[in-house]
Image (tube, rainbow, N blue to C red):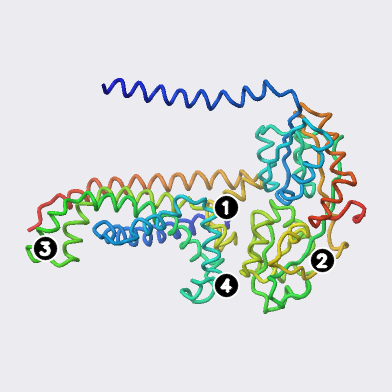
């Protein structure tokens, strides 16, 4: 009886494994439609799916999946062979690194949208009215993304350096691993101020945008897209990228706080 | 090894040891109290105590952020702001390690023959004496297992710690954090030695804990005491 029970258990487990593995394989054989895998910076997780849905209305049959994560994480995943068709990053560092390794097709690099860097504070806090206030003794903690791995942090550091504030505020900085964490810290009132993309700030009602970083204090901020070298759907990729840079997509992006390309020189 | 990496290692060891101590003492105490108690809502309380085990660390971190933050309901417990200090790292690690110790200790206490405890009481031993001379020694193997797990969890804690202690190199950056940020930035020259040292240290501590338990404490537990 004991042996029968063990045999039954093994059969159940095998069925489970086989049925689990069978399904996706069957799906792939049945659908010839292009499936795009898009790796994009976490800041786009609200806007991009909406734009994709618009695209799908005029291009039925295409399937678009997203992987949203910090730029550093995405870069690592792609370097380690993750299957991807399109990548969209803020800034250039990760894209350049991928280009150097031949993982993206550099002729397909395309600016998709622009953004601005803003100084945010908790909604009820009047302590910080402008960038200069960051150096004042009443301001205890400021949060930015880690400049080594977060594009928003890179730009934050560049802005603070160019405004002559970096040395004065360095000791007050709390570095985060992505720009959403900065927003969370400010929303919960645990830091006095933070530097995030304007698009990140636009999604929150618990924070106040105290100031926009002057355009001359940093390099222009673009989100750039590119097609991965190993993509099997290059034509669809290019079509989607072109759509992303187009007017229909721009309308959705502006709604989420991004700036149209025309805004930034 | 850079100053920052060394600081991260030392901080991690400090935080892990302290957090394990806190989680273990409270875990054993709660387990002992709840193993022999019966009251309405007991299962619910236990489920709450086990939550940090089930929830993703970032969620635990967010919860702690809300509880201990400037506007948080538990902020008054600590002098000054505890967030973004190494104490927050200890709290985060202790919170996630607690369920591991609690669960093991509870199972251990439940398996102690209650008649042994009753016998001790009839012989005149007070509750504290019963605990330290009967319950604890008999439950020791399970508690030891919990101790090892709690320590391992506390040392490796990353998500919740990052949220409440923040990544401030030299002050609150623990080894897992340093490793994460180094790997993200492609800085394998920093990451690899850190990983190696953390591995060696964990291996040594766990190995020693098991050896100490088997050779020193278990005999004490089994020894007849007059």
Residue at image location 65% in from the left, 60% down from the top: A175
Q: Residues within 10 Å of mark 2 (few under 14, many from 20)?
A: some
Q: State the residue position of label 4.
A: B70
Alpha-carbon span between mark 1 and mark 2: 31 Å
Which quarter of the figure is the N terminus of chain A placed in? top left
Task: Give the mark, 1 or 4, whose residue is nearer the N terminus.
Answer: 4
> On what subunit does the disc labeled 2 rest?
A
The image quarter containing residue A60 is top right
Q: CA distance from mark 1 to mark 3?
A: 52 Å
Callout 1 and callout 2 share a chain = no
Label 3 crowding class (10 Å Cα cut-off): few <14, some 14-19, many 20+? Answer: some
The chain that hosts pointer 3 is B
Apparent side of residue A105 relative to residue A14 in the rendered image (left or right):
right
Say which of marks 2 and 3 sits in front: 3
Residue B126: x %, y % from top left: 15, 67
Q: Disc 2, disc 4: CB below 8 Å?
A: no
**Chain identity of mark 1:** B
Labels 1 & 3 near each other (Cβ < 8 A) = no
- C-alpha gap between disc 2 and disc 4: 26 Å
Answer with mark 1 or mark 3, whichever residue precedes in sequence: 3
- Vertical comparison of A226 with B159: above or below: above
Chain bearing tag 4 is: B
Vertical comparison of A130 with B132: above or below: below
Disc 1 secondary structure class: helix
**What residue would you read off at disc 2?**
A212
Task: Tell me how many marks there are.
Answer: 4
Q: Which residue carries the number 1 mark?
A: B178
Residues at badges 1 and 4 in contact (C-beta under 8 Å)?
A: no
Question: Which label belongs to residue B121?
Answer: 3
Q: Residue B129 versus residue B36: which sits nearer the camera?
A: B36
Q: Residue A32 location, x and y as percent?
A: 74, 23
């Amino acid at each position: 009886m004991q042996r029968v029970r063990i045999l039954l258990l093994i059969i159940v487990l095998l069925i489970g494994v086989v049925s689990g593995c069978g399904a996706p394989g069957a799906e792939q054989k049945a659908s010839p439609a292009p499936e795009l895998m898009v790796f994009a910076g976490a800041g786009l997780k609200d806007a991009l799916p909406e734009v994709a849905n618009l695209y799908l209305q005029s291009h039925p049959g295409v399937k678009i999946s997203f992987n949203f994560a910090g730029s550093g994480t995405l870069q690592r995943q792609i370097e380690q062979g993750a299957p991807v068709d399109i990548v969209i990053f803020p800034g250039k560092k990760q894209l350049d690194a991928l280009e150097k390794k031949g993982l993206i097709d550099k002729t397909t690099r395309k600016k998709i949208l622009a953004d601005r860097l803003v100084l945010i504070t908790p909604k009820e806090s009047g302590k910080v009215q402008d960038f200069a206030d960051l150096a004042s003794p009443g301001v205890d903690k400021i949060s930015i993304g880690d400049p080594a791995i977060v594009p928003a942090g890179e730009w934050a550091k560049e802005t603070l350096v160019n405004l002559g504030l970096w040395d004065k505020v360095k000791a007050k900085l709390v570095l985060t691993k992505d720009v959403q964490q900065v927003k969370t810290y400010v929303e919960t009132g645990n830091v006095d101020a933070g530097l995030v993309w304007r698009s990140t700030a636009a999604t929150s009602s618990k924070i106040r945008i105290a100031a926009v970083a002057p355009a001359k204090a940093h390099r222009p901020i673009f989100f750039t897209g590119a097609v991965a070298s190993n993509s099997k759907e290059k034509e669809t990729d290019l079509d989607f990228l072109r759509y992303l840079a187009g007017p229909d997509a721009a309308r959705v992006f502006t709604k989420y706080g991004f700036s149209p390309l025309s805004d930034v020189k | 090894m850079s100053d920052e990496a060394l600081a991260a290692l030392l901080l991690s060891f400090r935080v892990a040891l302290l957090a394990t101590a806190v989680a273990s003492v409270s875990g054993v105490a709660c387990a002992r109290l709840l193993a022999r108690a019966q009251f309405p809502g007991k299962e619910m309380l236990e489920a709450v105590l086990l939550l940090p085990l089930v929830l993703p660390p970032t969620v635990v971190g967010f919860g702690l952020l809300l509880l201990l933050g400037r506007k948080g309901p538990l902020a008054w417990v600590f002098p000054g702001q505890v967030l973004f200090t190494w104490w927050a790292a200890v709290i985060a690690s202790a919170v996630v390690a607690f369920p591991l110790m609690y669960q093991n200790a509870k199972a251990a206490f439940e398996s102690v023959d209650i008649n042994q405890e009753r016998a001790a009481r009839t012989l005149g031993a007070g509750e504290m004496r019963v605990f330290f001379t009967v319950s604890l020694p008999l439950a020791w193997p399970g508690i030891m297992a919990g101790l090892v797990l709690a320590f391992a969890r506390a040392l490796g804690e990353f998500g919740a710690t990052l949220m409440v202690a923040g990544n401030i190199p030299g002050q609150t950056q623990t080894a897992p954090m340093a490793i994460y940020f180094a790997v993200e930035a492609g800085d394998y020259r920093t990451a690899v030695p850190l990983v190696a040292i953390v591995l060696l240290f964990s291996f040594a501590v766990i190995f020693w804990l098991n050896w100490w338990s088997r050779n020193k404490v278990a005999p004490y537990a089994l020894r007849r005491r007059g």
